Image (cartoon, rainbow, N blue to C red):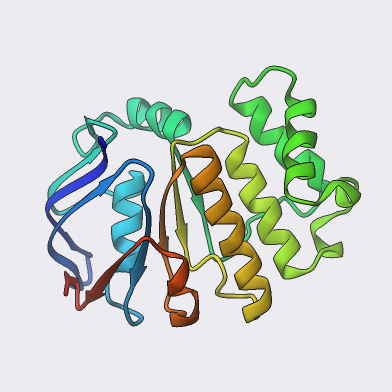
Amino acid sequence: MSEAIKVVNLKKVYPDGTKALKGINLTIKEGEFCGLMGPSGSGKSSLLHLIAGLDRPTEGNVWVLGREITSMEEDDLAEFRKKNIAFVFQFYYLLEDFSVLENLVIIGQMAGIRDVKRKALDILNFLRLEDKVKHKPSQLSGGQMQRVAIGRALMLEPKILLADEPTGNLDLEEGMRIFELFKHLNQEKGITFVVATHNTELSKFFSRIIRLRDGMIL
């Protein structure tokens, strides 16, 4: 099994002096469903942002699918990320003035996807949102909005999906549904998942748990 993600001696110090990561070494294989767990401030979000190329480390290196991304130019990194990595946040960041369908179509158009409306409808059907395509985000429940956010990520056919507290605003039942969906995508489509959560009741879904505390792996 090939390496999907590899980080070596990863450190992150923010301008205010906060040492978020203190030398992380980690390898995640393709097709793994990994959980990042630890208390608030343990470095989970910082690690995900560095793996996604959304931030730059203070020291160390990140390889994604065999490419060293920390030294990439911004344009090359953005193109690589668009083709390989999707990120799901705790807050849904949906376009409030557009319908559910339009939220997916806009992402697909920006990525140059052909037959973008048909693909968006197929994804919404897969997510059991076919009866919500014309709804605005304000007309949806929290769980439905998170499924739309996941659908938007799936429009790009990512090889790796990173999620930062994706159920943080949901009750346990809705959170279970989201994790069941993640597990299905992992098993059926082979997407590598790295999901940060503090909810121990969701840990049973992971094939491996990586525990962080004070910027280090325990």
Q: Residue at x 55, y 55 (%)?
A: 182
Say which of 184 and 73 sits in front.
Answer: 184
For residue 87, side relative to residue 62 (left or right): right
User: Which of the 4 image quarters holds residue 160?
Assistant: top left
Say above or below: 200 vs 109. Answer: below
> Where does residue 164 sit, x and y in percent of width and height?
45, 63
Say above or below: 121 vs 49. Answer: above
- Work out which residue is located at the far top of the displayed protein and give it: 114
For residue 21, side relative to residue 127 (left or right): left
Say which of 66 and 3 sits in front.
Answer: 3
Q: Residue at x 26, y 73 (%)?
A: 211
User: Which of the 4 image quarters holds residue 18?
Assistant: bottom left
Q: The N terminus appears in which quarter of the rendering?
A: top left
> Where does residue 191 sit, x and y in percent of width and height?
46, 42
User: Which of the 4 image quarters holds residue 136?
Assistant: bottom right
For residue 93, side relative to residue 195 (left or right): right
For residue 21, side relative to residue 75 (left or right): left
Q: The C terminus appears in which quarter of the rendering?
A: bottom left
Say how many tags the image has.
Answer: 0
Say above or below: 163 vs 127. Answer: below
> Where does residue 53 sit, x and y in percent of width and height?
33, 44
Q: Residue at x 43, y 73 (%)?
A: 203
> Where does residue 121 sit, x and y in percent of width and height?
80, 35
